[in-house]
Image (cartoon, rainbow, N blue to C red):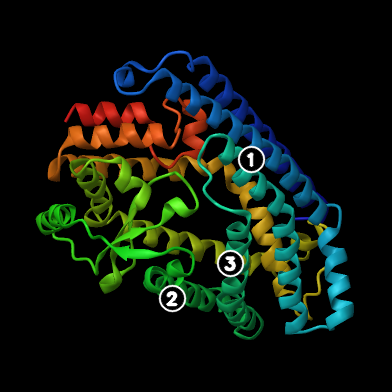
């Protein structure tokens, strides 16, 4: 392929993706607004009209912000690639550091820093304007920036050594570097599953053992019924940052632990908490987690093999506005260009991943209905939809592209039919 042809192809996909995402966003906002004056019949006795309209307004506000971010991010993407931004950045860092590993890591750091700076105002606005407006923000500016600093330090401490290993493999391990890099990356992902619950998550939130003896006994009976062993039941201080609530289990192997947001415990009745947890345990018992990890590893292997081919092709670089240095440490640039181009070419495949995820959610709901009470799960879901201002009337096509969970109406109808 010629570089000109690849440039045209890339630009065409950028335009198509941008147009489709705007079309989906506009559809979603119109659909939500159209149905905002009446609560769906399944929820009419449980969700007040005021809460339904709040969810509609919140959904529309988030969608509008997302479309604004999309415009900015698309402009940045074009600036980095077709307009030569990465080429300029590469030359500037090369002049400072000279060729070699320092240049490559410096290029990745500079790219990440510029991207983070561009995203920061949107993140701040979302937290302190949008979330604040709808009553969800509990975070202070100090905590907001403290989280960012912790994230940067953690990313540097964990990410830089990993990047160094990957770049070294790309440079020195021959044509099968992508296979060795995949093995390293897969091992790293598994290690993070073990370390995240006990080492990383506590850096950002406080986890305390569940001290409600009655609820603990109820949950332990549920775990015994389904055959789930956990390292502990913990409450996370989610209210420090947000009024949104959730429950999850994390970890891998013997490091598994169950975590409840304190906001969830304050809102749901014990039997509803049991039903929500039964749903989450369903994902584990039905091996959804293992299946997702396996798919992630398989897809990542395919993408790394593709990158192994593309990084040797001059047109891949020049078509994206970069003059390659194929014989002098070009691997960091190949990684950056691949990360920028991949979402452009794969966005239209998004519904395929949603199909699998939604199937798993229905299966986990059925598992919860079998091992707890379907009505309790319905009641809990209604409260969570209301408390989190999740729209009950999403546009079906928008939902197919963006939502990993089925629409509320579909989930409730299926549960009520059990």
Cα–Cα span, label 3 and label 2: 21 Å
Which is nearer the N-term, disc 3 or disc 2? 3
Across and down, in percent, residue 84 comes to: 86, 58
Q: Does dot 2 land on a helix, a strand or a loop?
A: helix
User: Left of 139 or right of it: where is 77?
Assistant: right
Q: Say if residue 306 shows up in the picture.
A: no
Residue located 25% across and 33% down the image:
378
- Which percent across, then down, holds residue 270? 20, 44
User: Which of marks 1 and 2 precedes in the sequence?
Assistant: 1
Foreground: disc 1 or disc 3: 1
Q: Can residue 123 be seen in this view?
A: yes
Number of the front mark, 3 or 2:
3
Asked if the residues shown at circle 1 and circle 3 are in contact, with their CB atoms under 8 angstroms apart, the answer is no
Q: Which label is found at residue 187? A: 2
Determine which residue is flagged by label 3: 151
The quarter in which the C terminus is drawn is top left
In three-dimensional space, the C-alpha distance between marks 1 and 3, rounded to whole angstroms, equals 22 Å
Disc number placed over residue 129 in the picture, else none: 1
Q: Is mark 1 on a helix, strand or loop?
A: helix
Q: What residue sits 77% from the left and 50% below the top? A: 76
Count neighbours of disc 2 (C-alpha within 10 A) and say few if under 14, some if 14 to 19, many if 20 or more.
few
Task: Give left or right: position of 220 versus 235.
Answer: left
Sequence-earlier tag: 1 or 3: 1
Residue at image point 58% right, 59% down:
143
């Amino acid at each position: 392929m010629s570089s000109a042809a690849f440039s045209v192809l890339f630009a065409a996909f950028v335009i198509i993706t941008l147009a489709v995402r705007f079309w989906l966003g506009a559809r979603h906002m119109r659909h939500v607004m159209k149905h905002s004056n009446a609560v769906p019949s399944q929820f009419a006795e449980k969700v007040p009209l005021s809460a339904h309209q709040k969810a509609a307004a919140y959904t529309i506000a988030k969608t509008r912000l997302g479309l604004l971010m999309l415009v900015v991010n698309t402009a940045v993407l074009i600036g980095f690639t077709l307009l030569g931004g990465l080429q300029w950045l590469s030359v500037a860092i090369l002049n400072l550091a000279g060729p070699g590993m320092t240049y490559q890591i410096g290029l990745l750091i500079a790219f990440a820093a510029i991207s983070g700076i561009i995203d920061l105002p949107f993140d701040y606005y979302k937290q302190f304007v949008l979330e604040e407006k709808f009553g969800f923000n509990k975070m202070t500016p100090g905590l907001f920036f403290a989280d960012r600093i912790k994230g940067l330090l953690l990313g540097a401490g964990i990410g830089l050594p990993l990047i160094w290993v990957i770049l070294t493999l790309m440079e020195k391990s021959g044509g099968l570097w992508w296979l060795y890099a995949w093995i390293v990356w897969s091992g790293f992902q598994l290690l993070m599953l073990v370390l995240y619950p006990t080492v990383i998550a506590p850096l950002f939130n406080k986890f305390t053992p569940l001290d409600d003896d009655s609820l603990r006994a109820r949950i332990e009976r549920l775990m015994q019924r389904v055959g789930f062993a956990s390292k502990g039941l913990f409450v996370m201080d989610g209210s420090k940052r947000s009024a949104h609530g959730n429950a999850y289990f994390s970890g891998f192997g013997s490091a598994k632990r169950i975590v409840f947001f304190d906001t969830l415990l304050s809102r749901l009745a014990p039997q509803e908490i049991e039903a929500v947890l039964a749903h989450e345990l369903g994902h584990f018992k039905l091996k959804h987690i293992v299946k997702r990890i396996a798919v992630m590893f398989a897809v990542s292997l395919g993408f790394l093999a593709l990158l192994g081919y593309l990084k040797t092709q001059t047109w891949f670089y020049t078509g994206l506005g970069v003059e390659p240095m194929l014989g002098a440490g070009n691997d960091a640039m190949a990684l950056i260009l691949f990360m920028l181009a991949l979402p452009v070419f794969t966005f239209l495949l998004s519904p395929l991943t949603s199909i699998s995820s939604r199937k798993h959610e229905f299966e986990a709901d059925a598992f919860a209905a079998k091992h707890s009470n379907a009505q309790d799960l319905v009641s809990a879901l209604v409260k969570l939809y209301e408390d989190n201002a999740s729209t009950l009337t999403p546009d079906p096509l928008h939902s197919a592209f963006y939502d990993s969970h089925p629409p509320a109406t579909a989930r409730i109808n299926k549960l009520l039919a059990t």
